[in-house]
Amino acid sequence: MVDVLFTHSYFLRFDPKQWEAGRPFPPLATLYAAAYLRSRGLRVALHDVQLLEHEDTLGAALERHDPRVLVVYDDGFNYLTKMCLSRMREAALAMLEVGRKRGLRTVVSSSDATDCSEMYLSSGAEFVIVGEGEQTLGELADVLLGRSGAAPADIPGLRFLGPDGIERTPPRPLLKDLDELPLPAWDLVDIESYRQHWLARHGHFHLNVSTTRGCPYKCNWCAKPIYGNRYTVRSPSSVADEWAMLKRQFAPDRLWVCDDIFGLKPGWVESFATELASRGGVVPFQIQARVDLMTESTVAALARSGCALAWVGAESGAQSILDAMDKGTRVEQIRDATDSLHAAGIGVAFFLQFGYPGETWENIESTLEMVRRLKPDDIGISVSYPLPGTAFYDHVQNQMGKKTNWKDSDDLDPMYPSPYRPEFYKVLHRRVHAEFRMRQAIKKGVRGRSMLRAAKYAARWAWLELRLRRGRQQAGRARGTVQGSVTTESTVQ
């Protein structure tokens, strides 16, 4: 018997695109919360659903662990949970309902539950945690387990149903010293299942870590339901200790630093490089960062500490779109950061975003030309996605239909009157990737002239298809409607 059983709602199989990519990471935020409760003397267990096939497995886990409290605690460090995908929402609600029917106290902490608390509270959740969750959950668990005489109304950071509707307690201040938290409860995870999944798909094994929480920048499409605009960072020594431990205990081939922004605090990366080297903890890793933070000293320190790849929010090759997004960066900074990182032997990957209001065909072509010219080592493509709590959402909310969330990460439906029809962006997404992979293959030296001709032929057809789509949509607008009917992707392959 345990006091609290943790689970989360991210089933990799429910997201076909991500299942195909085959890059699962343990639910880090869930492990932090479990470790925190255990540090307070509670018995905890984890039902990790990431690699499972369906929600029905929760019943067996409840039988096995016999908990008094069920907590659906999503991994807020995983950007996919911030997207509030409707298929994962269905999974979360189904598991909460199972817990409720068994008479358990039920708690949920997630971006989606923060945005849609009424839905969760009417569908199986007794409490919704809002904001940074560890301390709130610790105090609430003490109340639910009879270890405290406090009332839920006395605990900051909660929502629950009262006699007059949803009750909201005051916000909880964010932690100022992240070193006070215990390290994630790695022992609760079946690490070998993750290792075998990675090895089978890629031949190497990655693990995830976090060094910061939050982001102070104000890109107007970025949702921040958990940490808001605050930014807190662990000490370089604490992070170096954890990395050295992970290297000894699990021997990952690479670490994924899932911070929104790595190394924002001046001098932090330089100190971290020194601390890590003194512990023999260097492991190749990849980060997310801003192009305007890639100073000479930061890039040099990243190289010393083992950074292999930096994902940067390039977003667009058109300055007008970056400005409309309130990105706060310039196209020239994307170029300079790419050049600096490449010169230091660090790979560069671009996050690209299409479909932002006001984007033109010329803006799209500027982005594609930027990719061709700067030659990033990888790209990730998304379509502008309005999420509650953002200025972007407020701007388009009145123009949205009934659909307000993507089903999975490959949905790509703009859900508002975007410059082009939804199917345009699906084709754009696939064809930009196709050209990128072709150019990578050519760079590495594709064997056989026939393979090279085939790759170039496919790319030509890809761009022809896009131009056909653009032309037909422009013709449709001239007639007062958008047709968007083009040759299907299977036809041109």
Image (cartoon, rainbow, N blue to C red):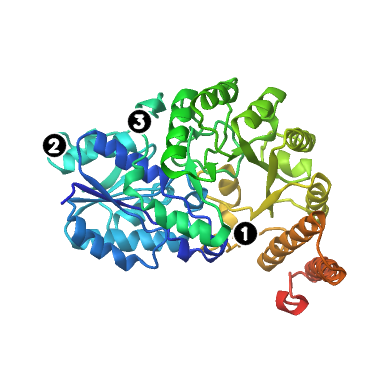
User: Height in image: 233 above or below 110?
Assistant: above
Circle 2 residue:
147
Q: Position of residue 120 (x, y in %)?
A: 33, 55
Tell which tag, 1 or 2, sits nearer the viewer.
Answer: 2
Disc 1, SS: loop
**Marks 1 and 2, the one that precedes in the sequence:** 2
Question: What percent of the width, then of the height, locates residue 121?
Answer: 30, 53
Amino acid at pointer 3 = Leu
Which mark is first along the chain, 1 or 3?
3
Viewer-nearest of discs 3 and 1: 3
Q: Quadrant of residue 492?
A: bottom right
Q: Secondary structure at mark 3?
A: loop
Residue at 41%, 54% in the rendered image? 192
Of circles 2 and 3, which is in front?
Answer: 3
Reading the chain from its start, which is encountered first: label 2 or label 3? 2
Residue linked to disc 3: 181
Residue 302 or residue 391, whichever sits in front? 302
Nearer-the-camera pick, 9 or 475: 9
Gap between marks 3 and 1, in whole Å? 39 Å
Is residue 123 visible in this depiction of the protein? no
Residue reaching furthest to the bottom: 491
Q: Which residue is mark 1?
A: 414
Crowd band around label 1 with a 10 angstrom C-alpha radius: few (<14), some (14–19), many (20+): many
